[in-house]
Image (cartoon, rainbow, N blue to C red):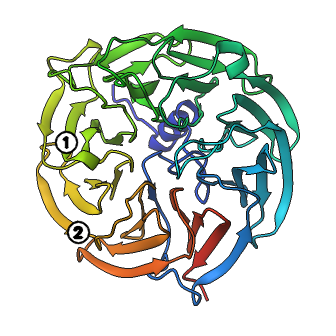
Amino acid sequence: MKCLVNISVVMAMLALIFPSPLQGESPHWRGPEQNGLFTGGPSPEQLTESTLQWKAPLPGKGTSTPIIVEKTIYLTSPDKGQDAVLAFNQLGKELWRMLLGDEKAGKHRNGSGANASPATDGERLFVYFKSGHFAGLDLTGHVLWQHNLVEQYGPDTLYWDHGTSPVVTQTGVVMTRMHKGESWLASYDPKTGALQWKIPRNYTTPTEGDHGYTTPIVTTLNDKEVILIWGAQHLTAHDPSNGQVLWSCGDFNPRNVVYWPAVATPVLINDMVVVPFGRADKRQPRLHGIRLTGKGDVTASNRIWKIDDHSCFVPSPTTDGKNALVLSDRGALASIDPETGNKNWTLQLTEHRSSYYASPSVADGKLYAPREDGVVFVVDLENRSILSENDLGERVIGSPVALGHNVYIRGEKHLFNFTSKD
């Protein structure tokens, strides 16, 4: 007997199990797939007055990246000593602003109390600040619930400012803290804010190796949703229903080098996780290729390659959909084959005393790479050439967001919208 399978029915069932972000939306830091790759276009080749659609003033210095849902742009910012959440429409008009309590200012010259980016499940917003304010809001700005995780669990001991953003799973809103002391991973009910579970995530590392500024990635392993976390010199996958470790990979620092915290978030390409490590800013780059398969401790089996001649420390790698694009802190861009670690090509962006802190993004065959002084490079990936070098006139640390014809960039003082559409 032949078994006839209706492919459309199967795909619909899979979509219910593993829903994809809606097109034209950016629900997390770094876009729909949390990798800095955006679809759509064409996107602008230059970010100048001729392509500037609008710029909206911001109340304070924040470094978080905007998210976009239902044609509304949401971001976090300080506002006269308070932690604030703001919403803008597609014309750059501020729709609302909600204050959540006293801010705790950043220590680093590029940091702030609003480093963490919002996340959304399509119905609610979830935000976190260095002060410890952790809240769920509806899309019109009403606070549904709020906790202060610093008051509950003590201050973090990070050398620099908190950077980890919340992420959304099918069942909860996940926060993680990685520092010297009690590190943990926790999930909260998106509707009520009730704690669903909280588990320790502690590893012994050399000095500062347990400090983590990365954001978890929600993906699948063995056909099940998992939370993938890089920090404390371990890459781990956790069950979203209870936080338990399902898969782990260690041995990233066999020589026990000190002062190697996890800052850049890995990029996942198919089943390969490209993990930046070391201190590329101090000529100590490391880059690992780890296969996300199997279960249990895969340290001995799943490290497919590692290189020590290129990586990134602060800016997270992105992808063109096939290869990893790794931008060093000093502007050296390399296309890396995720299966082998081999370089396809390299390109040096204009050298300058300023470094690259923002994580680059890719859209329409172009890479958008902000430098900390506010100069944003647009790179033609096919021709491996710089299309334009654009000075926005203020510092830029947030990652670009590209949807349709538009590129949104959060500067120190303004939210910019550039477009290729007349």
Residue 32 horizontal side relative to residue 352, left or right:
right
Secondary structure state at the residue bearing disc 2 = strand
User: For the residue carrying disc 1, how many other residues have a C-alpha within 10 Å: few (<14), some (14-19), or many (20+)?
Assistant: some
Residue 330 lies, with reference to residue 109, above or below; the image says: below
User: Is residue 196 shown above or below 33?
Assistant: above
- x and y, in percent, of residue 23 in the image: 58, 56
Image quarter of the N terminus: top left
Asked whether 335 or 61 is in front, the reply is 61
Kind of residue at badge 1: Gln
Residue 132 x, y percent position in the rendering: 69, 28
Mark 2, mark 1: which one is toward the viewer?
Answer: 1
Q: Is residue 110 above or below residue 19?
A: below
Kind of residue sitting beneath label 2: Gln
Horizontal and vertical percent position of residue 111: 56, 47
| Figure quadrant of the C terminus | bottom right
Q: Secondary structure at mark 1?
A: strand
Which of 358 and 417 lies nearest the eye of the viewer? Answer: 358
Query: Which residue corresponds to mark 1?
Result: 284
Mark 2 and mark 1 lie on one chain; the one further toward the N terminus is 1
Q: Which residue is rendered at x = 69% and y = 78% of the image?
A: 54
Q: How many marks?
A: 2
Residue at the location (46% across, 62% down)? 372
* Snapshot quadrant of residue 131: top right
Q: Nearer the viewer, residue 208 or 265?
A: 208
The residue wearing badge 2 is: 348
